[in-house]
Image (cartoon, rainbow, N blue to C red):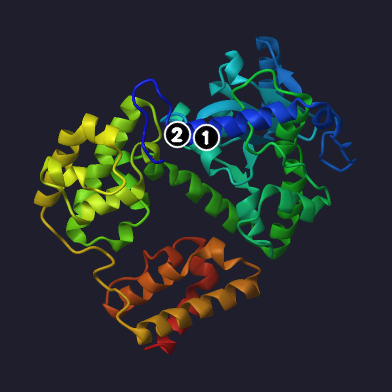
Amino acid sequence: MNRPSRPGKPHPTVAWRSRLRKASHDAAHHPEAESGTEAIPDLPGVFRGRATVVSDESQMTQMLEALQAAGTFAFDTEFIGEASYRPQTCLVQIATSDAVWLVDPIAGFDIEPVFRLVADPNIRTLVHAGEQDLDQVYRLTGTIPANVFDTQIAAGFASLSYPASLAKLVLELSGVKLHKGFTFTDWTLRPLSNAQLRYAADDVRYLPLVASRLDEQLREAGRDGWVNQECQARCDALRDACDPNLAWQRVRGVGSLEARGVNVLKELVLWRDAAAREADVPPRTMVKDECLVDLSKRPPKTMDQLKNVKHLPRPVIEQHANAILEAARRGVTVPVGRTKDEEGEEQGLSDKFRIDAVWAKIQSVCFAFGLDPAVVGSRQDAGDLLRAHDAGRSIHDNALLVGWRSRAIGDAIKEALDSVN
């Protein structure tokens, strides 16, 4: 059931998720859910009162003034991403040690002033796994978020697992077990129950405490600067993540394509993005990545060939056949160069062994530093590094040697490269 909708009819996946979200919303209004919220523990930096649901401009102004005065705040959003080209922001959660606020854009409140505070380098914003939330900030304001402290990233520098969920990190650092029953609720529906409001508030309530305890550990270890660099680098990467011309790099399966297929994929991804924007559906809902990869491996030239492409939805063919064929034609005519993978693939067991050896050395140094290797890089990065070294190319722009990583593991990388030559 991968067929996108005809005009006026929701995509089956969207309809299925909508039913699940509606069921969760209804369950949140059951008396048992309303009575199941536990007392908020007395912990430093944790506001124990009820969240303020911002309902007028006066409250909004007071909240913004309080955040500016505090100089730091926790930030999260509840959104639904499967029903539209851009995720729909349904609720914004804000917390300091002295208050928790919930801002409701569904009720018509302008959330841009809040998002501009997230982009203010003079104010520290606390998030957990905040990439998608910060993406919304960048898209709405056009400004890259600054002075962001992501507790999920920071945990990876503090002898804790990365990536860890908020619930696990809060439990580890505060002993509090969060209720996670409404992760997949329908945040577009109103009214929200007390249980939903409590769930949303708890997503930010404990972040000031978590950040404070991570700060202490990081300063003692001398890694607070590394965390700040990594968090800002992730924010800066939002520019590329929002660039349609670079979206092909994030297509699942792109690594299986030869150079000509990559050229075709680039054109097809640009077509898909434009078509999805016009239809107001997520690009991957219109056509799955796997289907684009298949089209790129065997670019169709005729309508009959297009109709035989597996998993390409019939309504998409009916509405966009000419555009797809033209995109494939453009990709085929682009001069072919070599892809990064073709410049140095793993040729055999010896290559695999050498890459494993380099990556094992990097991992051992990371553990000694109290770094989770996953926050540093990946085996793929180690493979790229070794192939560049073998080919006599510069390795200084490799992901494992950029910024703080060079200081953390640069010497270990040089030793590892020497040992496998």
Q: Is residue 119 visible?
A: no
Image height check: is 386 above or below 260?
below
Give the residue type that dot 1 points to.
Trp
The number of numbered badges drawn on the structure is: 2
SS of the residue at dot 1?
helix
Expressed as whole percent of the image width and height from the top left, the position of residue 359 reads 48, 76
The local crowd at label 2, few if under 14, some if 14 to 19, many if 20 or more residues have their Cα within 10 Å, is some
Image height check: is 256 above or below 207?
below
Q: Which image quadrant: the C terminus? A: bottom left
Q: Which residue is mark 2?
A: 12
Distance of mark 2 from mark 1, alpha carbons? 6 Å
Image height check: is 7 above or below 356?
above
Q: Are marks 2 and 1 in contact (CB under 8 Å)?
A: yes
Expressed as whole percent of the image width and height from the top left, the position of residue 298 reads 18, 55
Image height check: is 156 above or below 166?
below
Quarter of image, res 366: bottom right
Residue occupying image coordinates x 52% and y 72%: 409
Expressed as whole percent of the image width and height from the top left, the position of residue 363 reads 56, 74
Q: Which residue is mark 1?
A: 16
SS of the residue at dot 2?
helix
- Return the residue nearer the eye: 160 or 346: 346
- Residue 413 is left or right of residue 153, and the answer is left
- Residue 85 is left or right of residue 303, and the answer is right
Residue occupying image coordinates x 38% and y 20%: 8
